[in-house]
Image (tube, rainbow, N blue to C red):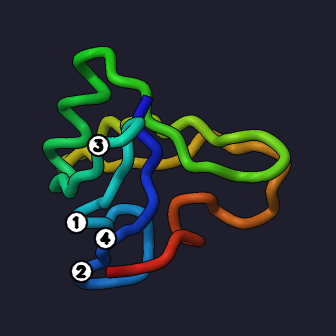
Amino acid sequence: MRYITHIHLEGGRRLEHISRVRWRDGLMTGTSTRQQMVEWIEDGGDARVQALPVDARVEVVNARPAYLRSVPNISVVDNLLSLPEF
């Protein structure tokens, strides 16, 4: 499971403006473009945002181009857009 820890926005402040993400997977860390993370999830990868009290799963929005969003949990803020930026 990969936890997205940071986002990089380009051209705006909405989900479709996330261009890159930083993540951790156990002891591994990395940076992926939006497209790389989209493909990883579509190939069966499990990405999440760590949130309290329940982690939020990240899914792909089938748009052109495809982008990422977190599945709503009981938080009132968007989990991805609330992450620190890099």
Q: Quadrant of the N terminus?
A: top left
Pair 4/1: label in front? 1
Q: Distance between the residues labelled 2 and 4?
A: 5 Å
Asked where in the image residue 11 lies, by quadrant, the reply is: bottom left
Q: Disc 3, disc 1: CB below 8 Å?
A: no
Q: How far apart are marks 2 and 1 (CA)?
A: 6 Å
Q: Which of disc 4 and disc 2 is earlier in sequence?
A: 2
Q: Which of disc 3 and disc 4 is earlier in sequence?
A: 4
Pair 3/1: label in front? 3
* Local crowd size for mark 1, using a 10 Å CA cut-off: few (<14), some (14–19), many (≥20): some
Q: Disc 4, disc 1: CB below 8 Å?
A: yes
Q: Which of disc 1 and disc 3 is earlier in sequence?
A: 1
**Amino acid type shown at disc 3:** Met
Which residue lies at the image location 41% right of the left edge and 36% below the top edge?
26
**Amino acid type shown at disc 2:** Glu
Q: Mark 1 points at which residue?
A: 19
Asked where in the image residue 37 lies, by quadrant, the reply is: top left
Which residue lies at the image location 15% right of the left edge and 42% below the top edge?
36
Q: Mark 3 points at which residue?
A: 28
Q: Name the residue under label 2.
A: 10
Per the image, label 1 sits on a secondary structure element best described as strand
